[in-house]
Image (tube, rainbow, N blue to C red):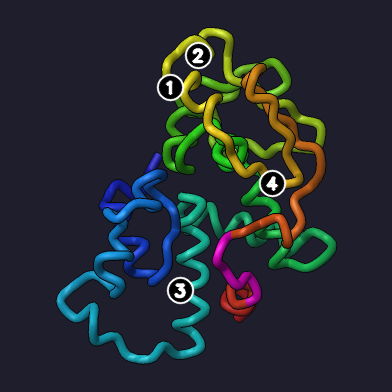
């Protein structure tokens, strides 16, 4: 499956905000935004003021890069969100949050969404007792996400189980059992990503 394989820090610099794509590195002095807070490239420091379309495009790109998905996938999420009842922008973020790889990251079982995606692809997790290796798997209220029995003994997951994580209200986690559960649908106030979803809706509505 196609995916971005270039430098993650360049994406943060291009958007001008931390997207937290590199886990612990994003919180250290090595963070690219902290050292070079301007867009990459020869003319990165001479960017002109963005048009309305430019602002809308940047918000869409920012959301795409945070969740690590391609344009075709993102458009499908938007179309599904548009068909649902309620506010389209909030529906879109809710669908993205309910991806399995995002939930694994939110539960503290991975240091970044990129790492969570890799762990899911390598079959380290079960959903309701069944192995799932599809990062885009859509979770529902009541679903239980757990580290497989075989993977629980690895040093990777032992170390993660000892680290406190800030789990959002729509999830619950039991670090001793290495499992979490979707207890409610994520609401906008629970989603702490630096994205203005209204601009994304405006872009796709044209």
Task: Please report the residue visible at 69 percent of the width from the left and 31 percent of the height from the top.
Answer: 173
Disc 2 target residue: 151
C-alpha separation, residue under disc 4 versus residue under disc 2: 24 Å
Query: Which circle, 2 or 3, is nearer the viewer?
Result: 2
Q: Earlier in the sequence, mark 4 or mark 1?
A: 1
Q: Please say if the residues under marks 1 and 2 sit with CB atoms less than 8 Å apart.
A: yes
Disc 3 target residue: 58
Q: Earlier in the sequence, mark 1 or mark 2?
A: 2
Q: Please say if the residues under marks 4 and 2 sit with CB atoms less than 8 Å apart.
A: no
Q: Earlier in the sequence, mark 4 or mark 3?
A: 3
Disc 4 target residue: 168
Q: Earlier in the sequence, mark 1 or mark 3?
A: 3
- Please identify the quadrant where the C terminus is shown: bottom right
Q: Residue furthest left?
A: 42
Residue 145: x percent and y percent?
Answer: 67, 26
Task: Please report the residue visible at 58 percent of the width from the left and 35 percent of the height from the top.
Answer: 164
C-alpha separation, residue under disc 4 versus residue under disc 3: 26 Å
Name the disc covering residue 156, or none: 1
């Amino acid at each position: 499956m196609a995916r971005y394989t270039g430098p993650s820090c360049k994406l943060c610099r291009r958007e001008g905000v931390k997207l937290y794509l590199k886990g612990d590195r994003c919180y250290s002095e090595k963070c690219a935004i902290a050292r070079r807070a301007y867009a990459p490239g020869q003319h990165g420091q001479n960017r002109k003021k963005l048009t309305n379309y430019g602002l809308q495009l940047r918000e869409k790109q920012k959301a795409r890069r945070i969740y690590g998905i391609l344009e075709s996938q993102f458009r499908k999420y938007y179309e599904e969100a548009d068909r649902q009842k309620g506010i389209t922008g909030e529906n879109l973020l809710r669908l993205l949050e309910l991806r399995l790889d995002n939930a694994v990251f939110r539960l503290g079982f991975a240091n970044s969404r990129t790492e969570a995606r890799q762990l899911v692809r390598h079959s380290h997790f079960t959903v309701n007792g069944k192995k799932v290796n599809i990062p885009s798997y859509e979770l529902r209220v009541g679903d239980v996400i757990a580290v497989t029995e075989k993977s629980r003994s690895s040093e990777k997951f032992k170390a993660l189980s000892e680290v406190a994580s800030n789990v959002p209200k729509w999830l619950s986690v039991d670090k001793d059992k290495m499992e979490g559960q979707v207890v409610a649908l994520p609401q906008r106030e629970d989603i702490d990503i630096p994205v203005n979803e209204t601009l994304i809706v405006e872009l796709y509505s044209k």
